[in-house]
Image: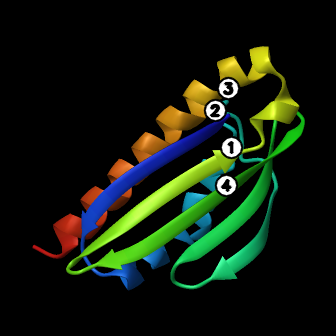
Amino acid sequence: MRIIKDVIISGSIEPIWAQVVSEDRLNITASGGDGDAPHPYEIFEVKAPTRLSYRSIVSGHPVITTIELSQKGKRTSLRVIVTGWEKVGHERAKAEMPKISMEWEKVLGSIKRDIESSTK
């Protein structure tokens, strides 16, 4: 089981990368979707400006979030993949995955709006 979210943003990769790796964004996305304070997270892979992977804890179990960016002409593809739900357990994953998915939709929408409004 995994969550995959994709968005295409009109803009170059560098300002999008800057938003993705900002401490505020990582804190929001490491909250586990439970609305509480952000959980600790550990970045274990950085290939600027195209890939970032980190571990965070959801329901006491580690999940891995990978953020991938690729330039597509004047646009940038931004993909988020969240894995590790097998260890959380089926019932808990069914409860947590929709929350995390919705949080990512909000974050990606916010990044898209911020970048595209700044280029107009």
* Pointer 1 or 3: first along the chain: 1
Residue 65: mark in rendering: 4
Q: Mark 1 = which residue?
A: 31
- C-alpha separation, residue under disc 2 versus residue under disc 1: 7 Å
Please identify, in this view, whether the residue under mark 3 or under mark 2 is nearer the observer: 3
Residue 112 placement (x, y as % from top left): 30, 59
Q: Mark 3–mark 2 contact, CB under 8 Å?
A: no
Residue 35: mark in rendering: 2
Q: Quadrant of residue 11?
A: bottom left
Most extreme residue toward the left is: 120
* Pointer 1 or 4: first along the chain: 1
Q: Secondary structure at mark 4?
A: strand
Decide: few, some or many residues near mark 2? Use Cα within 10 Å; few <14, some 14-19, many ≥20: few
Decide: few, some or many residues near mark 4? Use Cα within 10 Å; few <14, some 14-19, many ≥20: many
Residue 76 placement (x, y as % from top left): 32, 72
Query: At label 1, which amino acid type do we have?
Result: Ser
Q: Is residue 55 above or below residue 84?
A: below
Residue 96: mark in rendering: 3
Residue sitting at x 63%, y 71%: 52
Q: Quadrant of residue 55?
A: bottom right
Q: Is residue 80 above or below residue 97?
A: below
Q: Is residue 2 above or below residue 115?
A: above
Q: Mark 4–mark 2 contact, CB under 8 Å?
A: no
Q: Quadrant of residue 94?
A: top right
Please identify, in this view, whether the residue under mark 4 or under mark 2 is nearer the observer: 4
